Amino acid sequence: MSRERAKRMTLGPAQESIEKIKKVVEEGNYYGAQQMYKSFSARYISADRYSEALDILQSGACIQLENGQVTCGTELAVLFVETLVKGKFPYDDDTLDRIRKIYKKFPRISVPQHLDLADDDMQQLSEALGAAKTRAEGCSSYLKAAIKSWPRSGYGGKMMEQKKDGDLEEKGEDVIRALT
């Protein structure tokens, strides 16, 4: 039996891994869950089971973002896009829906509106601005990866054919329009 085939046989269904990691998240161990998401998805990728790796990465990105773990969620979201490229997935509505689903999980940060110059209000404002900055940087990294890496990889299907002479900015605008 070939080594590749042996790898495929030793990995269970991705959903089992996802459920196992969800329990770790429910315990509040976000860092441990992050390491598991990365480790499990890497195993599926090395076994050429890209669809299942994408399931794990998408689930992880969404769960981490839902729990306010923007840095962790962003890392998994970017790995999701890198796996799209590595697995040579087409630019189609289903894949774009998956990208959109992750994008919509980035938390919306509200900034306090009516502030006094009291220390508590300034602390609240500072924390809100810090969270907003982290969210904006993470979301930006994810969208840049989706715009630059995946369509440019040549597996961008429709977009690459329609925009054959267009530049990367035009393609990026198409992806952003499709996400929103």
Image (cartoon, grey):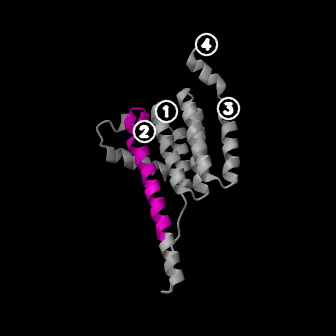
Can see residue 114?
no
Tell me the tag on residue 89: 1
Residue labelled with disc 2: 150
Q: What residue occupies the far top of the structure in this picture?
A: 1
The residue nearer to you, when weighing 160 against 101, is 101
At label 2, the amino acid type is Trp
Cα distance in 3D space between marks 2 and 4: 34 Å
Please tell me how crowded label 4 is: few (under 14), some (14-19), or many (20+) other residues with Cα within 10 Å.
Answer: few
Relative to residue 98, is residue 104 depicted above or below?
Answer: below
Asked whether, in this view, residue 139 is left or right of residue 168, the answer is right
Tell me whether the residue at label 2 lies in contact with that at label 1, contact meaning CB atoms closer than 8 angstroms: yes
Magenta residue span: 129-158
Please tell me how crowded label 3 is: few (under 14), some (14-19), or many (20+) other residues with Cα within 10 Å.
Answer: few
Disc with the residue nearer the chain's start (4 vs 3): 4
* Secondary element at tag 1: loop
Q: Position of residue 65 (x, y in %)?
A: 57, 54
Please tell me how crowded label 1 is: few (under 14), some (14-19), or many (20+) other residues with Cα within 10 Å.
Answer: many
| Mark nearer the viewer, 2 or 3 | 3
